[in-house]
Amino acid sequence: MLVLTRRLNQSIKIGDDIEITVIEVRGDQVRLGVSAPRDVSVHRKEVYLQIQQENRAASQSSAEEVSLDALTQAMQSLPKPQ
């Protein structure tokens, strides 16, 4: 991990397109401003982790639905008992 020290209104750059600026320091809280292209997602870590968890749950649910649909179709194509 790279550790940097910045003061109020100072910035760091990540690559050519992302800039993080210290906007305010109040007690133990630091407000940061992030300037990034629109195609770059920027989230607080706890929000990012929640999104990842929801995406995993949705993909598992989708896979289960697809499997259930395939099973239903396979059963419908079986000959009916007489």
Image: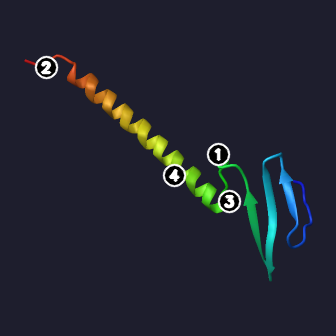
Q: Are marks 1 and 4 in contact (CB under 8 Å)?
A: no
Residue plotted at (80% across, 56% down): 19
Q: Which mark is residue 39?
A: 1
Query: Mark 4 = which residue?
Result: 54
The answer to whether residue 8 is above or below residue 70 is: below
Distance (Cα) linking label 4 and label 2: 40 Å
Q: Image quadrant for the N terminus?
A: bottom right
- Report x, y in % for residue 46: 64, 62
Mark 3 vs mark 1: in front: 1
Distance (Cα) linking label 1 and label 4: 21 Å
Query: Mark 3 = which residue?
Result: 45
The answer to which image quadrant residue 35 occupies is bottom right
The answer to which image quadrant residue 34 occupies is bottom right
Distance (Cα) linking label 3 and label 2: 54 Å
The kind of residue tagged 1 is Asp
The kind of residue tagged 3 is Lys
The kind of residue tagged 4 is Glu
The kind of residue tagged 2 is Lys
Query: Mark 2 = which residue?
Result: 80
Q: Which mark is residue 12?
A: none
- Determine the secondary structure under disc 2: loop
